[in-house]
Image (cartoon, coloured by chain):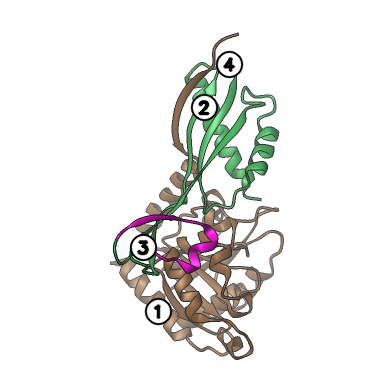
Chain colours: A green, B brown
Amino acid sequence: MHEMPITESILNIVLKHAVMNKASKVMAVHLQIGRLSDLEDEWLQRYFDYLSKGTIAEGAKLEIERMPIVVRCDACSTSYETQVDKIGNLVCPSCGAESGTLVSGREYYIKSMEVQ
Amino acid sequence: MAGVKLIEVKEEIMADNAKQAETIRGELHGKKTMLLNLMSSPGSGKTSLILRTMDGLKGSFNLGVIEADIDSTVDAEKVVAAGAPAVQLKTGGFCHLDATMVRQGLDALTEKNFDLIIIENVGNLVCPAEFDTGAHKNVMILSVPEGDDKPLKYPLMFSVCDLLLINKTDYLALSDFDINALRKRVLVLNPKIVILEISCKTGAGIDDWIDWLKKEIEDFKK
């Protein structure tokens, strides 16, 4: 459900940059979203298609790059990548410690877009 | 046909909401009013906790409440009946509150001199975690019947909160809820989170919650 307001924000930012760059059409938008977010790619695209109708961003493809969940080991400070379903059972690949601190995985970022 | 050009955008998607949230935080800080965002699943005890909190703060701090639900006013009615100023926001289908909706709630509270305003967010462990409401503190409730696996399913919620209240501890004897496993799972996501065990029904642990809250309000006012 919260895909809707997020998509609205994406569209507003995209249209603002399209105008700033005097674009006539937006072909694609490159997003970076952390793996901790449960936004569904398919729903983002569907809402975007719906909201962008009649704008120069109509038909643009959302290219979503999922950013990894990275944890830093509390014992030896090694940073390593993990998955959502492993967060409850972390093991540091370097020293075996089971506790860590989240470094990344919560991004919501528009990196770039392709326009004509 | 004109060639395709790549333009750099480099913008946070939630920037507008973040800006509105920062404005709210700053304004309330100036008024020495702490804003607390309370989140949880439906039925985990948010309204019961607010009623307990009204009792616990009576005589020391002024409390106001912003209730949010998709479509009902029962929560605000309960709080008003118990004696605290409350407004009800109907989100009209939205599953969360954002900073703009919180602004409407703050404007609707007619009395203005609060030490603490609690936002009772929409019952949901997913969407409310994504939106900064402008609160100074984020608190969540996980109740024992929901299970100790929730940090694995809804990691973002556990990673954005300052305090986790484990409610309905009076059910512990009836369930296989593993508090140690839960603590471990939560602390990976959020090493700074404070975890307290309470029962809104029996009153167990409520003093710890009130002590934490009073200290936070006092620190905030300094």
The residue pinned by badge 3 equals: B32
User: Measured from the top left, where is residue B106 in percent x and y?
Assistant: 51, 57
Numbered tag placed on residue B60 in the rendering: 1
Numbered tag placed on residue A113 in the rendering: 2
Tell me what residue is drawn at x 43 percent, y 80 percent. B210
Please report, as a chain letter, where disc 4 is located.
A
Query: Between B126 and B184, which is closer to the camera in this rendering?
Result: B184
User: Mark 4 and mark 1: span between their CA atoms?
Assistant: 61 Å
- Which of discs 4 and 2 lies nearer the camera? The answer is 2
Query: Between B181 and B17, which is closer to the camera in this rendering?
Result: B181
Tell me what residue is drawn at x 64 percent, y 56 percent. B95
Numbered tag placed on residue A24 in the rendering: 4
Q: Are marks 2 and 1 in contact (CB under 8 Å)?
A: no
Labels 3, 1: one chain: yes
- Few, some or many residues within 10 Å of mark 3 (<14, 14–19, 20+): some
Looking at the rendered structure, the secondary structure element under dot 4 is loop
- Which of discs 2 and 1 lies nearer the camera? The answer is 2
- Few, some or many residues within 10 Å of mark 4 (<14, 14–19, 20+): some
The boundaries of the magenta stretch are A77-94
User: Mark 2 and mark 1: span between their CA atoms?
Assistant: 54 Å
Q: Amino acid at mark 2?
A: Met
- Which of discs 4 and 1 lies nearer the camera? The answer is 4
User: Measured from the top left, where is residue B206 in percent x and y?
Assistant: 48, 84
User: Measured from the top left, where is residue B84 in percent x and y?
Assistant: 54, 73
Q: Amino acid at mark 1?
A: Ser
